[in-house]
Image (cartoon, rainbow, N blue to C red):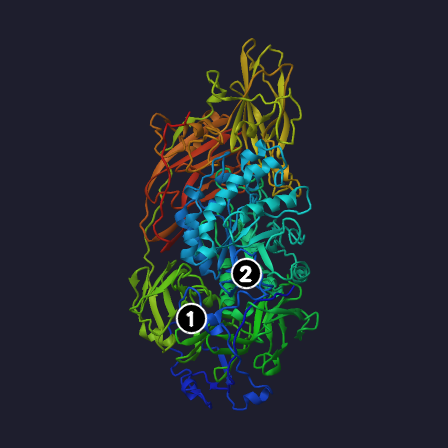
């Protein structure tokens, strides 16, 4: 349950107390008069619209303060902390900052001494590094220009790493074809990570799960290999070689040791060591990496506390376990499962010589198909800021030092990416919405991430115990406190939560703490420490920051601590109804109490000298601040600790993306605005001017002095440039029938004959005549597949039976000649009542048969993706998508033909958008969804009119529209269908990319965000809707382009890669 954190460190000097009255003037009795005399040498009132008057600031002054605490504060050596906080911007910090790489306490894989580890943390270039990471799958945002946007937001949230899956099926769509072009490229991702200063943990599988089709395994492998997937079967081993070698070739020059961002590579995903061939499979994967120039550690993520691959065959360098304590049903977001309390004990019992690594901790949840599915807003509530506060800090209390939150940005499962259990949106209720907009979860992560970055002593903590074990003395048993302590420095972190972690009650308590000044019951000047329901706090004692800053104790949460310019800066928060207290070494003990109802617009400087600055505000105000790093030199210039220890505090804007300080003293800030705001900056003293997105910001002298009178302070005003951006109405639709296959004149001679009698797919046909009608066996695994069964009618045929497998929430419509027979519906109701295959009889209406000639039964079947591994059943991904049983009652089928996307998975023409973008509809095969396809001969028909005559069938609706959105804005747009339940499916194509699948009879998704880069913001755009009417009833679908958010700023120029229609390779 408690967490250990890492860091080595320094101590401070003895101090006396200083009294500050509310007017802001100070009287002092102190030997350090040059500093103390400057404490609040100016009034604190002259800030605009401030309502700080109700704040009661209590400061005690006495030379006798030390006598209250028998032990004087020692002045301890500072082995590496001071350079850590210095202003120097160096690639590798000075030798005094380095731990000894050859120390026997450090482990390595024997391939490099630049990436090591011990039982606390990773050791990079001899420095302890705690990993606080977020999951991001670049393939779910198929616009490489926007990857930097996500990584800048990762950094702005206080995280220092991303965990990244790669998708075998996208990168290796056919045997011998490995493709790192377009959105599949890894180099732009690695480059963006270097630019942002974010480490990369690469997770290439081959199996990744991730709610993707076949769990990431290439579709061709599921039908072309006889051996069991994810084992050491020879043909499976041969199948992944090209893919893994491609990953290796892309990654080797981007490893940390080569100046790149990649610090670890994960082997496969959530697996079991005990299965037949499993351990040997891991051993073979590891041999592939070890037989190359990959030198970074190999890691693993256990699906639970299973102790897999810790020791024995296939064991990895660093073991980790995944944890999703709230699971994946967001229907009742207010209901919580309790925190997991045995993490620490499990780690100590499993791999105590390694850091406690959590490769996936719940950062949201996927959502399922069905009319009762709650939607991602509920998932974001279930795993919202309160969940993050309690459950993330429970990881800290368990002494986890390598933590990754799944997801930070979910994105879009466009095209055929999803496995059958999820729909197009992979928003995941993450800190960033699918549209890339930040949420309140982002802000909570920032509170946590900046505290961890500010607290290097946290990197090397031992878990001492908790209030249940007697290690912590708490006055109220309703509060549960875990103690982590850095034994080198004496710094302690007391992590408090409700004993009942899901309690919504407010709990007040006092805490007995052992400090360098003795044992003290805190707080002393306010009544108690307060925990709101579903809240966790970290109380610190003997806490060091900056070059000489020292906190004896603080019940006020620390938002930021460090050294900026010449000043040690501490920023704490104190919210309404939560009395807080600080005891500092700045020649003063400062006790702060915030009565109920206090609000403030900006931080109040309670200590303001040329060497010390202490700020306090409510947490919402602190949430508007960012701490961008000032880059150093070398390839890791933008990485905190390794390349730079310089930072600034910037408050007010929606987002700060980056900062740089010029030789002329100009601080250049880049970021986003949602509205006009006051900009507040704490920087080094040689900062003389500020620009925002390249434009000078006028300094407000009065407001600047209200924040601090010392150099390096800046307050100005940023004006939001409101633009009248209007989105066009989608009109002028053109229509064409997209199901000519049911017409008598249709010629399927170019289709593939479906005549296989054997299959590597282990799920065999139920009935028929021995022929296997599985799409993947004929090269058609993705999206919609069409089947045509021919027979020479005698007139006695009465019906046909089909068992059709399409995966959860699929559908299949059946015609005899041109007569609609009906639709088989797969089903899901929030992952209940699941049907992934059906077995139905379709009766032939009188007059539909044409005796004596060829008759054709046509099946249009939606393939919802291939299943993921089901427990130990790895071959579950060999899903039998297609017709598992066929019977012509009183007749016999002749030839069967099959057609999926043009070219199948071996010869598809659209290599830019890739193997999963298209299916087998006639319009898709002809390229009707692509930009510049000529629809001039088509009829005009509004989408809301549905198909002609209310018929069942499939039609394509295409229109174009212009956009003219000026540069310098990040405008987030969506395509929004009507919310009504109707029996139709709609494939949404935007400039050729399948960006949505609307299943109107199931839901829940009706809104589909589409990004710039897919959309051309300064040109003509093509939108196509393939409308599948699954019943013969009138349909009235509507579609609008909607403006979701407009921000001034953005990541910079966005490159579109939307190839236009070409006849080459098309029907």
Residue 791 shows in the view: yes
Task: First in sequence, mark 2 or 1: give its number.
Answer: 2
User: As rendered, which of 904 and 1 lies closer to the eye?
Assistant: 904
Q: Which mark is residue 732?
A: none
Question: Mark 1: which secondary structure?
Answer: loop
How packed mark 1 is, by other alpha carbons closer than 10 Å (few <14, some 14-19, many 20 or more), is many
Q: Residue furthest right?
A: 469
How many badges with numbers are in the image?
2
The reply, left or right, for residue 354 in relation to residue 1061 is: right
Disc 1 target residue: 602
* Residue 722 percent coordinates (x, y): 33, 55
* Residue 474 percent coordinates (x, y): 66, 74
* Residue 864 percent coordinates (x, y): 55, 36
Disc 2 target residue: 116
Question: Which of label 2 and label 1 is nearer to you?
Answer: 2
Does 542 appear above or below 192?
A: below
Residue shown at the point (48%, 51%) measured from the top left: 433
How packed mark 2 is, by other alpha carbons closer than 10 Å (few <14, some 14-19, many 20 or more), is many
User: As rendered, which of 1018 and 925 lies closer to the eye?
Assistant: 925
Does 674 appear above or below 291?
A: below
On the rendered image, what quadrant is the N terminus found in? bottom right
Residue shown at the point (57%, 45%) measured from the top left: 285
On the rendered image, what quadrant is the C terminus found in? top left
Residue shown at the point (41%, 53%) measured from the top left: 192
Q: Are marks 2 and 1 in contact (CB under 8 Å)?
A: no
Distance Cα–Cα, label 2 vs label 1? 42 Å
């Amino acid at each position: 349950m408690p967490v250990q954190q890492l860091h080595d460190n320094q101590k401070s000097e003895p101090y006396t107390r200083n009294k500050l009255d509310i007017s802001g003037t100070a009287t002092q009795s102190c030997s350090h008069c040059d500093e103390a005399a400057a404490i609040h040498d100016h009034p604190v009132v002259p800030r605009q619209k401030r309502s700080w008057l109700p704040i009661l600031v209590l400061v005690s002054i006495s030379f006798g303060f030390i006598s209250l605490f028998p032990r004087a504060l020692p002045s301890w050596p500072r082995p590496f902390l001071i350079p850590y906080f210095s202003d120097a911007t160096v690639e590798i910090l000075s030798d005094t900052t380095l731990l000894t790489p050859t120390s026997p306490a450090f482990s390595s894989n024997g391939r490099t001494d630049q990436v090591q580890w011990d039982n606390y943390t990773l050791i990079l270039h001899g420095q302890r590094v705690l990993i606080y990471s977020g999951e991001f799958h670049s393939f779910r945002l198929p616009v490489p220009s926007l990857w930097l946007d996500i990584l800048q937001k990762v950094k702005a949230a206080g995280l220092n790493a991303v965990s990244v899956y790669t998708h075998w099926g996208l990168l290796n769509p056919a045997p011998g074809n490995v493709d790192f072009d377009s959105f599949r490229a890894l180099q732009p991702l690695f480059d963006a990570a270097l630019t942002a200063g974010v480490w990369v943990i690469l997770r290439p599988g081959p199996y990744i799960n991730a709610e993707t089709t076949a769990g990431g395994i290439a579709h061709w492998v599921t039908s072309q290999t006889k051996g069991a997937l994810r084992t050491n079967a020879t043909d499976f081993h041969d199948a992944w070689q090209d893919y893994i070698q491609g990953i290796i070739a892309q990654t080797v020059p981007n490893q940390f040791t080569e100046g790149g961002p990649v610090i670890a590579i994960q082997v496969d995903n959530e697996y079991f060591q005990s299965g037949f061939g499993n351990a040997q499979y891991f051993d073979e994967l590891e041999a592939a990496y070890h037989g190359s120039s990959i030198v970074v550690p190999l890691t693993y993520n256990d699906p639970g506390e299973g102790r897999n691959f810790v020791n024995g065959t296939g064991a990895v360098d660093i073991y980790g376990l995944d944890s999703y304590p709230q699971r994946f049903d967001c229907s009742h977001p207010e209901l919580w499962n309790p925190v997991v309390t045995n993490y620490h004990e499990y780690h100590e019992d499993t791999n105590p010589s390694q850091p406690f690594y959590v490769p996936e901790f719940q950062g949201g949840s996927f959502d399922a198909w069905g009319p009762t599915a709650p939607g991602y807003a509920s998932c974001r509530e279930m795993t919202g800021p309160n969940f993050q506060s309690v459950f993330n800090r429970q990881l800290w209390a368990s002494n986890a030092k390598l933590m990754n939150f799944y997801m930070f940005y979910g994105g879009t499962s466009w095209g055929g990416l999803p496995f059958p259990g999820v729909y197009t949106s992979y928003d995941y209720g993450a800190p960033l919405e699918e549209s890339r907009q930040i949420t309140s979860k982002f802000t909570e992560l920032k509170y946590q991430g900046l505290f961890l970055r500010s607290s290097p002593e946290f990197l090397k903590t031992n878990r001492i115990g908790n209030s249940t074990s007697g290690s912590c003395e708490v006055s109220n048993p309703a509060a549960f406190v875990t103690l982590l302590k850095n034994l080198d420095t004496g710094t302690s972190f007391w992590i408090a939560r409700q004993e009942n972690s899901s309690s919504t009650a407010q709990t007040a308590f006092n805490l007995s703490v052992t400090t360098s000044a003795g044992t003290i019951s805190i707080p002393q000047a306010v009544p108690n420490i307060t925990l709101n329901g579903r809240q966790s706090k970290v109380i610190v004692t003997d806490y060091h920051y900056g070059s000489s800053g020292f906190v004896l104790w603080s019940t006020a949460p620390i938002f930021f601590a460090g050294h900026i310019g010449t000043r040690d800066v501490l920023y704490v928060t104190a919210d309404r109804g939560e009395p807080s207290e600080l005891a500092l070494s700045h020649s003063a003990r400062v006790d702060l109490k915030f009565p109920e109802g206090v609000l403030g617009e900006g931080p109040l400087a309670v200590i303001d000298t040329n060497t010390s600055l202490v700020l306090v505000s409510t947490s919402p105000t602190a949430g508007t601040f960012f701490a961008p790093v000032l880059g150093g030199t070398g390839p890791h210039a933008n990485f905190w600790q390794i390349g730079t220890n310089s930072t600034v505090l910037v408050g007010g804007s929606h987002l700060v993306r980056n900062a740089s300080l010029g030789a002329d003293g100009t601080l250049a800030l880049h970021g986003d605005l949602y509205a006009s705001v006051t900009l507040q900056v704490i920087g080094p003293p040689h900062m003389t001017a500020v620009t925002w997105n390249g434009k000078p910001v006028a300094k407000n002298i009065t407001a600047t002095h209200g924040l601090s009178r010392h150099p390096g302070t800046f307050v100005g005003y940023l004006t939001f440039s409101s633009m009248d951006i209007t989105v066009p109405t989608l009109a002028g639709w053109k229509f064409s029938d997209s199901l000519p296959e049911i017409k008598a004149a249709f010629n399927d001679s170019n289709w593939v004959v479906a005549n296989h009698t054997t299959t590597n797919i282990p799920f065999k046909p139920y009935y028929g005549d021995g022929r296997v009608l599985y799409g993947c066996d004929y090269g058609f695994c993705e999206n919609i597949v069409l089947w045509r069964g021919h027979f020479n009618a005698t007139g006695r045929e009465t019906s046909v039976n089909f068992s059709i497998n399409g995966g959860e929430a699929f559908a299949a419509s059946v015609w005899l000649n041109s007569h609609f027979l009906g639709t088989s519906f797969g089903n899901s109701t929030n992952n209940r009542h699941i049907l992934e295959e059906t077995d139905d009889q379709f009766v032939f209406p009188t007059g539909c048969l044409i005796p004596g000639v060829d008759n054709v039964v046509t099946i249009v079947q939606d393939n919802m993706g291939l299943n993921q591994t089901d427990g130990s059943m790895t071959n579950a991904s060999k899903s039998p998508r297609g017709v598992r049983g066929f019977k012509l009652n009183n007749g016999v089928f002749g030839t069967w033909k099959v057609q999926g996307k043009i070219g199948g998975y071996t010869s598809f023409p659209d290599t830019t958008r890739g193997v999963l973008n298209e299916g087998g509809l006639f319009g898709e095969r002809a390229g009707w969804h692509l930009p510049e396809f000529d629809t001039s001969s088509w009829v005009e028909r509004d989408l809301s009119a549905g198909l002609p005559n209310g018929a069942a069938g499939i039609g394509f609706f295409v229109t174009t529209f212009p956009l003219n959105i000026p540069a310098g804005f990040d405008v987030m747009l969506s395509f929004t269908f009507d919310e009504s339940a109707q029996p139709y499916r709609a494939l949404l194509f935007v400039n050729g990319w399948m960006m949505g699948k609307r299943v109107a009879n199931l839901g829940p998704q009706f809104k589909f965000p589409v990004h710039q880069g897919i959309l051309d913001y300064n040109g003509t755009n093509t939108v196509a809707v393939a409308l599948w009417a699954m019943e013969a009833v009138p349909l009235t679908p509507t579609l609008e382009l909607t403006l979701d958010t407009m921000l001034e700023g953005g990541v910079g120029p966005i490159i579109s890669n939307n190839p236009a229609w070409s006849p080459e390779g098309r029907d």
